Image (tube, rainbow, N blue to C red):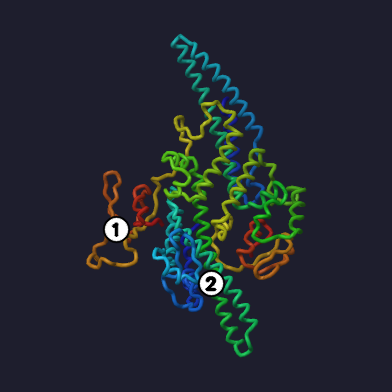
Amino acid sequence: MYGDLSNKLILEAKRAKQLRETSTSLASQLTPYQETFVRNILKEVEQLKQNAIFLHEEIVNETDPMQLKMKKCQYYVNFFAMERNKRCLLAYHKDRSDTMDSLCWDQQNLILNGGNGNKGNKHDATTLDNNNNNDDNDNDNNSNNIDNETFDINNLSHEEQVYIREYSKLITSLNGDEFADIDLNGSLVPPSEVFIDVRVLKDAGEIQTEYGVFNLIKDSQFFVRQSDVERLIQQGYLKKI
Amino acid sequence: MDIDDILADLDDTTNIPTSSSFNTSVFSINNNNNDSSITEENSILTEDDTLIGHHNNNTHKTDNNTTITFHPEKDYQELITTWRNERMAPEILHYPDNLIKRILYYVEQQIEYIEYLSLGFDNDSTSTDNNANRNVNTMYKDKKLSLLCMEAELERVKFVIRSYIRCRLSKIDRFAIYLHQLINLDDIGNDELSKSGLVSRTEYMYLVKHSELLLNHLHNTVLKHMHENLQAIDDNNGSIDMVTKPQLDNFVFIFVRGRNQNTNDNNNKKDKKETYVVHIDDEEIDLVTGGIYIIRYNVIKKYLEEGLVVLL
């Protein structure tokens, strides 16, 4: 029946939403794009469109009032089915784009890194050295086999990849001149202490801060200024303890 | 997020007797040599909003008769109020352009001041002779604490601004199409938009670009396959309205602040509190100054804009 596929798509969106709320791992934030569903729905829409054109012609040529009524009825049902499909498709895509938006805000660098090399590093508050870049490339090569925290760009459709990249750029440009001191991407949890203890989860090379250079080696512990390492915590290099 | 927690946090440093809160430390930027004296008119802003270097503000002050004075403490309070209102209001509120500009200026100054202090102390502790060393050391420790407090306070103010802007951006995202309609309806261009004051220039840029991105994306994936009559994303004839609009009849908590929140100028009216009348259907309700109410947002919208009530 018309609209059944759309229903399935909406169910899929609901499931993805539930998964987002219950799971914290980055990989489960965006489920794979349901390309077959979408394509089949679009096929259905195409068919409905042909029907509509056909019915429209019939209505114009119909003279018998009883028949006309029936045809019109058919036409409307047809039309509503199209509209329903459209709304469902839009809802699914909007839901995904909203998720991508929030991912962009929280995990900006990760997304860009997952997508194409190390573009993201240029927005970094703390400069990471070459070691780190090599690390990132390694992660990219063997994707999510090793690292569950790596964002998998393959879950997105081609259009979505374009969208997410453009949106990341937009966010970066917002951070420009006017709010240069604020760092809009920062944490939305109110800060309680200036200095915090952090543990290094992944080798991240050296970082330069006002208080000197830290060499971030796995499992070591530092007492650093929170605002200096905010970005590294977001990226999963450090963990607050 | 619990607002009370945040506020409690924000108040933390002001409770430490030795520390200087954000406001007072902002003051001390401009008179570096006498930390304790706090005057209200320290730095000035000329009319065309260019900022004057703080070291020679006194001379400039005499030069320009038309200057705007800064009141950091008041601005800070206002920022907190604006932030709270924004977070609790169902729709997007007017953007306080000048307030944000001033606050950002304070933040910038404060960062510089903190940098100056930390550098200054480094010099002090290395280059002084033995006699003074002890004194300097204790002083260094004292200042270190206040420096820490200042930094903490700075981070908090930054957090409030960040939270405020992000809250506005998320509202812009949510009501993107609605805002577009609103803006097109009034036929406001880019320049006049900032005058109308609903969103700032940056926010407008964000609104336009983001909806463009989103529309492109949706068009490429869905809409271009649709029947031509079905390509709109803002039609509301069919079933449910496609445009997300703010729920103006949501309930909000309000506190009636009244006209003079600080001083009781009207001494003779002391026992009789000022009231504001609102109408719900045919019913008349008096809002007493100092009272807390739960009420539909659209009823008190105009009082909120006048600043007579604040959202909680």
Say which residue label 1 marks: B288
| Mark 1 to mark 2 CA distance (whole Å) | 38 Å
Residue B99, how many percent across, how many down? Answer: 45, 59
Q: Using residue A206 as the reference point, say whether residue B275 is left or right of it.
A: left
Q: Earlier in the sequence, mark 1 or mark 2?
A: 2
Residue lying at 77% horizontally and 48% vertically, measured from the top left: A141
In the image, which is nearer the foreground, mark 1 or mark 2? Answer: 2
Q: Is residue A111 above or below residue B269?
A: above
Whether marks 1 and 2 lie on the same chain: yes
Q: Residue furthest front?
A: B63
Question: Viewer-proximal residue, B306 or A12?
Answer: B306
Residue A60, how many percent across, how many down? Answer: 49, 13
Q: Is residue A109 above or below residue B108?
A: above
Residue A230, how many percent across, how many down? Answer: 62, 61
Q: Using residue A109 as the reference point, say whether residue B155 is left or right of it.
A: left
* The N terminus of chain A - image quarter: top right
Question: Viewer-proximal residue, A112 or B127?
Answer: B127
Q: Residue furthest top?
A: A64
At label 2, the amino acid type is Cys
The residue marked by circle 1 belongs to what chain? B
Label 1 sits on a secondary structure element that is: strand
Task: Confirm whether residue A239 shows in the render.
Answer: yes
The residue marked by circle 2 belongs to what chain? B
Label 2 sits on a secondary structure element that is: helix
Say which residue label 2 marks: B149
How many other residues sit within 10 Å of disc 2, few (<14), some (14-19) or many (≥20)? Answer: many
* The C terminus of chain A - image quarter: bottom right
Question: Viewer-proximal residue, B292 or B102?
Answer: B102
Residue lying at 45% horizontally and 55% vertically, measured from the top left: B97
